Amino acid sequence: MSSLRPYQEQAADFLYERDRAMILAPVGAGKTAITLTTMQAMLKDGHAKRFLVLAPKRVAVSVWPVEQPKWAPDVTLAVAVGTPKQRAAAFASSAQVVVTNYENLPTGKFDAVVFDELTRLKNPSGKRFKDLLKFLAPFEIRWGLTGSFTSNGLEDVFGQCKIVDQSLLGRSKGAFQQQYFVLINPDFGEWAPRKGSLEKVMAVIKPATFVLDAGEYSDKLPPLHTVEVRCDLYDRKPYDTMKKDFKLQDITAINAAVVTGKLQQLASGFVYHTVQTPSEIPGKWVTVQTPVWFDTAKFDRLEELLNENQRANTLIVYNYQEELAELKRRYKQLNTLDDQRAIERWNQGEIELLAVHPKSAGHGLNLQHGGCRIIFLSLPWSLELYEQTIGRLHRSGQRHDVWCYVMLTNKTVDERIWAALHDKRAISDIAMEELC
């Protein structure tokens, strides 16, 4: 059985002493190890009979069953992922811990639950949240694991706290908003935090939250260097036309939200054109997204960057399928997570270029052994996804400085997204300070 580090032991003690608690720790800090160790102790001492773990699917399949033998060898674990029959068998088994993904509504008898990547439950108005809350009513023990409560703003905190302990911020999001926010746009239900609200909310949840000392942990990791890599469009006219007119040739954006997405695409050189084509069924039509290319500046700059780095093993983060398609056209050696043994081969140093999407690589992947360079070809709007994706490399076990390259097309929405991530990070940083 592996041994916890001192800071992990403190976190494990914190969980053991509380039925309702949350662990706030950076990527790679060992939240799974901490929780499994505590779960084994709780089961052994009779404080819990059976644990349910809710996690992103990839984490449920590739992290919990791998980590369990290291940290909780005396505990039996089943994974309830797959066909309905496979899931039902896992829930009906005698396993002391059953792990499933958030998309599944569990069945069976449990008295304790762990929410891995708690931010998945930030929306308390969704049907899945409400069904899950009803199912969890008899659960006395509820633990939440997260990297940041406030990755996209203070409002995210309410749902996460409600699912763990309704006594923290109350049962009603409306009452929460009335207390800590100001309604700035009644027509669209837009709220803005009152002055000092972030500090007040963090003070309320502090007794139930263990915050890993970022300074203590980061000292154990090699440095992370973030570098902006900028380029100019060869021809700005298509971008400027779409921005001004919401239209480019026969490609139209119906509102500001749609045009923002199309501007991000144009910053990478293309834009999707939505067309209707006949389906195989007579009289039926299907909607198809067809990419139209206008510029190659960003991909040409990417080529220069890869050459500057001597073709070192590199993760390339994309957001659009057409970006991935262009990467495949340019680089025959490119691999994706769908390729056979991709993670294993990457960590063995056998893959030069591995293309990943933030939503598939943002959680549950250990990629620190295969390289130390990551390039964001385009950025996600989510700070959580951005930080979690970097955390695939910048985590325990990484032996080299990590270099994160953020590709930005000048005078485009790329710069707005990058600024937005910095603003959200500021909110997250303040929250961490208040909880420490």
Image (cartoon, rainbow, N blue to C red):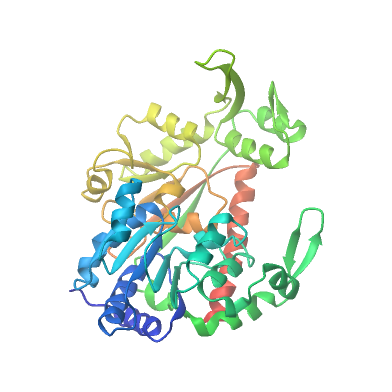
**Left or right: 183, with 99 as reference point:** right
Q: Residue at x 45, y 71 (%)?
A: 144
Residue 24 visible, this angle: no
Residue 78 drawn at (x, y percent) = 27, 60
User: In front: 106, or 40?
Assistant: 106
* Residue 246 occupies quadrant: top right
Residue 195 visible, this angle: yes
Residue 257 drawn at (x, y percent) = 68, 42
**Left or right: 2, with 47 as reference point:** left
Q: Residue at x 72, y 34 (%)?
A: 254
Q: Which residue is drawn at 23% across and 43% down?
A: 341
**Left or right: 361, with 118 as reference point:** left
**Left or right: 181, with 26 as reference point:** right
Total marks shown come to 0
* Residue 312 occupies quadrant: top left
Compared with 288, 397 (above or below) is: below
* Residue extending farthest top: 282
Residue 372 drawn at (x, y percent) = 33, 54
Q: Residue at x 69, y 28 (%)?
A: 237
Residue 25 drawn at (x, y percent) = 43, 71
Compared with 171, 394 (above or below) is: above
* Residue 335 occupies quadrant: top left
User: In front: 393, or 120?
Assistant: 120
User: In front: 249, or 22?
Assistant: 22
Compared with 251, 16 (above or below) is: below
